[in-house]
Amino acid sequence: MMNEKIHKSSSIILRKTTGEILLCKRSDKLKHFPDNWVFPGGKIEDPLPEDWKGDEAVVLQRAFIEMYEEVGIIPGSNKVIPPKNRKQDYYIHDYDEHDRAEFKANCVFIGKKKTPPFGLILFDAAYFIIQHELIDNLEPIADGSEIVEVVWLQPADAIQKWKELKIRLPPPILHIIRNISQYPDHFQIKTLAEMKLPIGLQTKVELFPNYQSIPFYSNTIAPFTTTNLIVYENSGESIIIDPGAKETEFDHLQEYLYTLTSTPKVLVTHHHMDHWSGLQVVETLFPNTILYGHSNTLDKIETKLQKQSITDGFITIGEKNLQIIYTPGHTDGHIMIFDREQKVLIAGDHVVGYGSAVLDPEYGNMKDYFDTTHKLIELNPEVIFPAHGPVNFNPTSLLKQYIEHRTNRESMIYQAIINGSDTYDKVIKAVYQDVDSSMWDYAKSNIKLHVEKLIADEKLNQEFYLN
């Protein structure tokens, strides 16, 4: 069912006896979690079985090595090594020497957590914590490469900074910090108990204040394997967007929906089944809720729920008015949600976490796609929640890339036609050499829509067609 590659990793939480924890800011040039604040840690190179426990000696050793390389701390030592000297000291210090015994003895395993499967690489991370006077006077130094900044913060202060958008925290890190803040003396009991829970319950996948994005395995198209269930909560009320879980995920979806404190409103961004196939779970749990969507979407969905057509307007959740925006292009009934106050855009399939969206061959429209993309740029969102893949925190740049990408692709298609390509296969071979051949059927769909736009723009005559 899953094609993801799992990276095992190990992290260590350093906590002063006064309660402050060490957070490290990752470089914005890194591929995974750029510009995020994390605990010292990294990938485990040593071989481990698939059913690894997390508390193996080699796992703790990896946490020690990463702590040393990233912030210069040698376990059991009162000194911090400057970045330029770390390689030298690494080789002359044995991690099992007596002066580290007390440090190691006070390291507590608090469980493992997995990153949500937004992409094809997941991290299964083991976490340790040490709270001891051994680290009270340490002033860690960032290596300047992977880690660019370090800070000691009380857990409650870290959470507040995240709420104020002053720092960015990955879901597992935020979740652990919340546990430490709420249960300072026995949080490890909770984190250990959470290990067996599924995504969304093991860790609350809150990527922006009040907004969750929980990926459920769905019958979507490559390269994606999941559809994100987007959840917004405010003042005890909530709305869920695109419940597209496949049948094998229904128990998982039901278990998550049970955690909602009230009957949610439901919205579907468009009619593709990987965005609503979990509705029968919603029907069972919340038979009296309302399903919102564009009329062109609702006409194509089978459900027992009461339907409410919406094109433009607002949906009120608690004290928040969320704007509904008609955004055709991917399909003729596509809508999005925009939080004007927090500048959050829930974008359905117009935006994807990586690559670019494939338009519906029957109901898609390339001119509408361009117009919608320009409209979204004018909204100037701060963050975009796509239906597939990770959240994007640089949306204006991404949307401009979409315009550039589609413009270039259309120019190449037009040039290929001018040069004599008179079939879809010829155009594909001329234009889509950078795309895996397994995706060429989808490319054909986009070519068709580009050709329709070129005809509408009077760059091709009305009688033109490709075989």
Image (cartoon, rainbow, N blue to C red):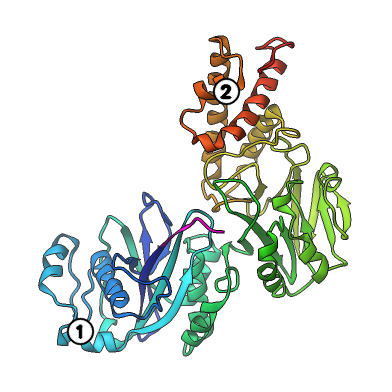
Amino acid type assigned to the residue bearing label 2 in the image: Asp
Q: Is residue 288 magenta?
A: no
Residue at screen point 67% across, 26% down? 449
Q: Secondary structure at mark 1?
A: helix
Residue at screen point 74% across, 56% down? 277
- Looking at the image, residue 389 sits to the left or right of residue 39; the answer is right
- Looking at the image, residue 62 sits to the left or right of residue 122; the answer is left
**To which residue does mark 1 refer?**
100
Crowd rating for badge 1 (residues with CA inside 10 Å; few <14, some 14–19, many 20+): some
Indicate which disc, 1 or 2, sits on the residue closer to the N terminus.
Answer: 1
Q: Is residue 4 magenta?
A: yes
User: Does 16 sit above or below residue 316?
Assistant: below
- Residue 316: x percent and y percent? 79, 59
- Residue 393: x percent and y percent? 52, 50
Residue at screen point 28% across, 76% down? 58
The tally of labels here is 2
- Looking at the image, residue 242 sits to the left or right of residue 425; the answer is right
Q: Secondary structure at mark 2?
A: helix
- Residue 362: x percent and y percent? 75, 33
Crowd rating for badge 2 (residues with CA inside 10 Å; few <14, some 14–19, many 20+): some
Mark identifier at residue 431: none
Q: What's drawn in magenta, residue-wise? A: 1-6
Foreground label between 1 and 2: 2
Q: Say if mark 1 contacts mark 2, CB within 8 Å.
A: no
Amino acid type assigned to the residue bearing label 1 in the image: Arg
Mark identifier at residue 425: 2
